[in-house]
Structures are given as C-alpha cells and as structure tokens.
Amino acid sequence: MGIKEDGEDGVEKNGIREPLISDHASNKGHPWMVYFTTLVAVCGSYEFGTCAGYSSPTQDAIRSDLGLSLAEYSLFGSILTFGAMIGAITAGPIADLIGRKGAMRVSSAFCVAGWLVIFFSEGPIPLDIGRLATGYGMGSFSYVVPVFIAEIAPKELRGALTALNQFMICGAVSVSFVIGNVLSWRTLALIGLIPTGVLLLGLFIIPESPRWLAKRGRGKEFETALQTLRGKDADISQEADEIQDYITSLEQLPKPKLLELFQTRYLRSVTIGIGLMVCQQFGGINGICFYLSSIFELAGFSAFAGTVIYACLQIVITGLGAALIDKAGRKPLLLISGTGLVAGCIFTAAAFYLKVHEVGLGAVPALALIGILVYIGSFSLGMGAVPWVVMSEIFPINIKGLAGSVATLVNWFGAWLCSYTFNFLMSWSSYGTFIVYGAINAVAIVFIIVVVPETKGKSLEELQAAINA
C-alpha cells in the first residue's frame, strides 16, 4: 500500500504539519493483534511489579539466611531505586536507537541476570548487584512499555491499553506479597524470571512500533507493522499518511539536546510530562506504600489485615480506572483522583492528631484505615496510571526518547526522595506528614486544572502538534 506524498492532509503550524482530525473507526479492522501485542508488552509491567514487590515479604528470610544487618537489608531494598534511575536515563536513547522491542529485550536481559544473581547469592554484595540489575530493568520498562503501547494503539483504545501498564504493576506487587509469604526467597527470585521469559518469546511474534519504523525511514516495514496491527482488511492509508507527514515535518527540525527541551516549542509538553510525575510521586505514595505496615501498627490497626485490604482495593480500582480512561477522559480521572488524595490525607492526619492528643482514641484505627484506603483507592483510579499514559502521548517522536527519559528519571527520583524522607517526617509529626502530603496534592489539582490538556480521542500526531504548536 503506497504512502501519499502530497501535502494536503494537514495544516502547517510553526514549522510542524498538524494532521487534520480524522476518524479511522470505520477502517480499523479487527484489533486482536493490538490486544495481543499489548498483552506481550505488559509482561514488562508485570516484571516491574515483581521487582518492586520482592523485598517486602522476603525481608525476614533473607536476613536470617544470609545474616544481614538491618542496614545491609535496607541497602538491598533501596538500591533498586538507584538502578531504576539509571534505567530511566538510558531507556529513551536505547529505545530510539534499537527500537522499542530492542529496549524491552535489553530490560529483560538485566532482569534475568539480576534474578539469577539474587538466586545464587550467599552474601550482601552479590545480592545488591542483582537488585541493582533488576532495578535497571524495572526503570527501563517503566518508560518503554507505556510508550510502545501508545504508539501501536488506535486512538479510541490508547488510554485503556496504556493504563494496563499500571494494572499489571499493581497485580504483580500484590501477587508477590501473597506468594512471598509462602515460598522461599530464592524460589520467589526464580518466579521473577517467568514474566521476562514470556515477554522475550512474545517479542519474536509481535510487530515493532510503526512510528519508530517510520522515524527510522523504514517505510516498507512501517506499512507492514501498521497493517498487521490494524488487520489485514483495514484501510491504513489515511493513518499512515498522517504519521509519515508528521514525522517528515519533525525531521526538518534540529535534534534537540537536553537544555533545548525547554525551548518554547517543546516547553508545554515537557512541563506537562515532568509536572505530572512530580504530582504523582511527591504526594506521598511511595512513603505510604513502603511503610504501610508501620502506619497501620502506629494507628492500632492490624498490619496484615490492612495490607491485604489495601492490595485487593488497589487491583480493583486500578482496573476500574483502566476501563474508564477512554470514556471519562484523562483529566477528569486526574481531578477526581487528586481530590480523593487530599481527602485521604485529611482523614489520616485527623487519625494521628487524635492519637497524639489522646482524644477519641477508639476512632483512631477506623479513621486511619478509611484515610489510607481512600488515599490508595484515589491514587489507583487516576494518579497512578494517567501520568504514564499522558507522558507516552504528549512528546513528539523526535524528542520522545530524551524527554521521556527525563520525565521517568524525575519520577524515580521522587520515589526515592519520598520513601527516604517519610520516616524523618513521621518522627517530626505523624499528622503533620499527612498535612504536607495533602497540601502537595492540592497544588497538584491546581496544576492539572491549569496546565494539563485532555488527550482522549485524538491521534498522537494531532495531539502533539496542538500541544507543541
């Protein structure tokens, strides 16, 4: 199928050709290959969750078997985040150089190596090396999986399919928590190999991102990949023309360096992408998740019961958010989520305030449970998945690798900073900690209202041209 070379499919704005709004619904064919390709890709998301959920249920067993001190195990737990930061920095350039599938293979290789090193570890140093390697793979997956899904999905399915990334992460964390209390830590490490094995096999079957192929000038492979994804009987000519036309316009621009991301042309998309990652992480999610058991114990509620309820609620609400994202839209979910986060922080702060001042102590456990569940339910509905969805949509393909890596790095830095400072904040003031988080989430709501656009129902080319015009 030929690619038209005329320039009648768009309107030029600031040197970038913006495609006209088009409806491919009547020509979309059968999207089964899109679903299958997405299922293969989110094995990387599941691997992300197995890496993140490994250290919590295995702490006592690893410390006992290998004789680790609390400080040594704390290093083992936290070094994952540093590996993820390195993965975030390098994932974008690697994905641009060798393709989205190639980047997933690299991520898988690091995870496989990391799990095997952990399995054979007899001391803290190999344990940390293995954890660092799985962290690298996890950080790389956190960028490349949502970007790949966004680039292969038709616009009417893009939000829900990309949101599966967060759903699989939550599911894997919860599964790791449950089976980690039954299996040995070495067996749990071997189970971490399963998602990468499925992913590596699936990558031989699924097509590469058509947009990446078009950017690399591989026109024939681009058409074949797009036709495979849309169905053999689908008419892809209009969508192919829009993608090619937009990429041709972008290729006329100089390839930006890091500081050039903050030029006027790209400033809005970079502000949105980085800003949403700040909103997601600095509102307290990782501090609360990492120290969930101690929060419940401090409030006088059963840590085990609270954690199980939390895990189940997280999976259900994340699934609900994925189902709603293409119907309700990204921005409404973010606003509802942000409002719930503020409410959850208020409930939890009130519980600890009552405990500190020894007023209404009988209500403290219930109030803390309500606050935490409202918080995590609200986060799972929107703030957990939607920033990754929007990040994968808004960056033009000529800056996607660099800008996406910066946004992902900011996310992982925020995750580390939040988890590192949580205990210090709780020592300062238990209720004050949640007041601070509530204030940050309130600022996030304002940011979403003022800065973040709705991206539902628009092609990537149409959306990026409008944002970066």
Image (tube, rainbow, N blue to C red):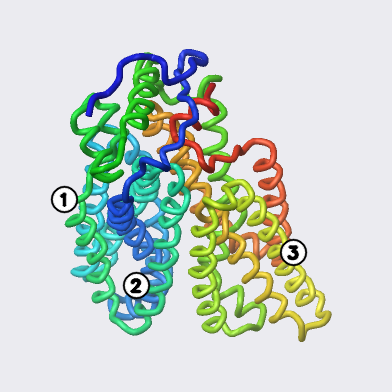
Residue 360 locus on image (x, y percent): 82, 82
Which residue is at 40% across, 76% downward? 57
Q: Earlier in the sequence, mark 2 or mark 1?
A: 2
| Mark nearer the viewer, 3 or 2 | 3
Which residue is at 21% across, 59% downward? 112
Which element type, helix, strand or loop, lies under badge 3? Answer: helix
Q: Are marks 3 and 1 in contact (CB under 8 Å)?
A: no
Image quarter (top left, top right, bottom left or bottom right) of the C terminus:
top right
| Mark nearer the viewer, 3 or 1 | 1
Location of residue 414 with respect to 363 vertically, above or below? above
**Front residue (pair 444, 214):** 214
Which element type, helix, strand or loop, lies under badge 2? Answer: loop
Q: CA distance from mark 2 to mark 1?
A: 41 Å
Please name the amino acid that badge 2 sits on.
Answer: Leu
- Residue count near mark 2 (Cα–Cα under 10 Å), binned few <14, some 14–19, many ≥20: some
Residue assigned mark 3:
346
Which residue is at 50% across, 54% downward? 385
Residue assigned mark 1:
204
Please name the amino acid that badge 1 sits on.
Answer: Phe
Q: CA distance from mark 3 to mark 2?
A: 38 Å
**Front residue (pair 272, 64):** 272
| Mark nearer the viewer, 2 or 1 | 1
Please name the amino acid that badge 3 sits on.
Answer: Ile
Location of residue 37 with respect to 350 vertically, above or below? above
- Residue count near mark 3 (Cα–Cα under 10 Å), binned few <14, some 14–19, many ≥20: many
Q: CA distance from mark 3 to mark 1?
A: 49 Å
Residue assigned mark 2:
68
